[in-house]
Image (cartoon, rainbow, N blue to C red):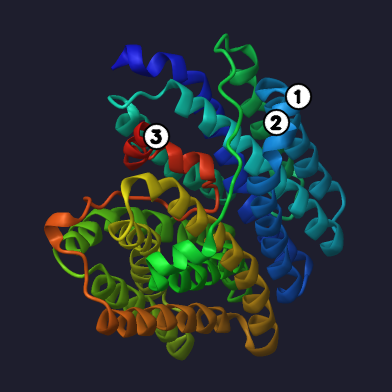
Amino acid sequence: MRRNLFPIFALLLGTAFLLAGNGLHGLLLPMRGAHEGFSATALGLLGTGWATGFVLGCVFSQRLVRRIGHVRAFSAFSSMIAIIALLTGLVIDPVAWIVLRVVTGFALAAAFMIIESWLNERATNETRGMIFSLYMTITYVAIVGGQMSIAFGDVGGSTFFMICGILYCLALLPTAVSTASSPAPLKEVRIDLKMIYRNSPVSVVAIVLIGIANGAFGTLGPVFGANVGLSGAVVATMMSITIFSGALMQIPAGRMSDRMDRRHVLAALAATAGVSGFALVLFAPTDLGILFGLIALYGAMSYTLYSIVVAHANDFASNDQFVTISSGLLLLYGVGTIIGPTVGGFAMSAGGPHLLFAVTALAHLGVAGYAILRARRRAPVPVGARESFTSVPSSRQATPESITLDPRAAPSEEAA
């Protein structure tokens, strides 16, 4: 175990700092923006800008990394992210923040792809599952750790911006001093939307709608909390509850989808997420116990949908199509996260903070309705012919390089 982990320890440590900084910065900006009186539309565009940059980084950063090398590219991108984090603390302006978030998204996508390509280089078929699970665990824990640090200070000051800069700088140190050799060049991202749609229409439609819901809530959830009078500590707790409840629900939902038509499971989970969203709109709970209960239900349902969609799409695909289909779905999810914050911001500006959940509810009910419709038109893959469910976080930090780290990608690589 130690022999397998030692070569990737520096990479995982750098990943933890990078994710913690991103978790803190991603929560800090909408909360500080709300504190400064920025409109919900402007705050929604922060998420749209970040998601746009991230998708562009997944598609176009490979050539730059190939030209200057992994170590220098990672150092450059991490430094750029740290500088931007400090700039957002110096320049308190919504337009400047939106532009800087596009650059941050691009740089973070490139940095994550570099880390994941390094992990892929170190993984073997025997250790791939362990490394993938450890990487996913670090993803959850580091993001939540960064978010929860908001509870220990005042978002109205400059301290948290400086902490973000420090975390991003710490992220580049383990890799910079590591003696590990650079991995193979990053893979070009190619998408065959027609093939993916022919393979599974419900996956294409559902993944975009899930991206809209998750993008809206991930960006504007803190704004909702601030606008209804929650403290910074309570907002951080609320956002962390959704992540943890989604993580806890992954395995039960996955096992259920292994035993029955995944589209029925997808519809049930999405419908429940939609109902919980409408409950937050209709009842506007002020009691923290009720609010957290509904938020936990929302997170448990909504953050399991991505994994089930990927599993369903790959039920109908051959082994050598796993990376192509999963990468395509990931980028389609990114398109949804670009749309969601903008739509959510307009809704909140027009009708108040609770309308954020009307946007997520409509997206989730759309997933449920289309999944039921497709289940009537196409028979499911027999249970014995399916691959077992594997948890895949729908966090916006995932890149196409993380797809090849998934244990299910190993047969594809062997076939290639």
Whole-percent x, y for residue 126 in the image? 27, 24
Kind of residue at disc 3: Glu
Residue 407 to residue 119: above or below: below
Q: Which residue is mark 2?
A: 65
Residue 359: image x %, image y %? Answer: 54, 81
Asked if labels 1 and 3 touch by Cβ distance under 8 angstroms, the answer is no
Q: Residues within 10 Å of mark 2 (few under 14, many from 20)?
A: many
Q: Are marks 1 and 2 in contact (CB under 8 Å)?
A: yes
Q: Position of residue 117 (x, y in %)?
A: 53, 30
Q: Estimate the spatial distance between the alpha carbons at disc 1 and disc 2, rounded to whole Å.
A: 6 Å
361 or 61: nearer the viewer: 61
Which of 328/288 is in front? Answer: 328
Q: Which residue is mark 3?
A: 413
Which residue sits at x=58%, y=37%? 187
Judged from the image, the secondary structure of the residue bearing numbered disc 2 is helix
Question: In this figure, which residue is indicated by the disc labeled 1?
Answer: 68
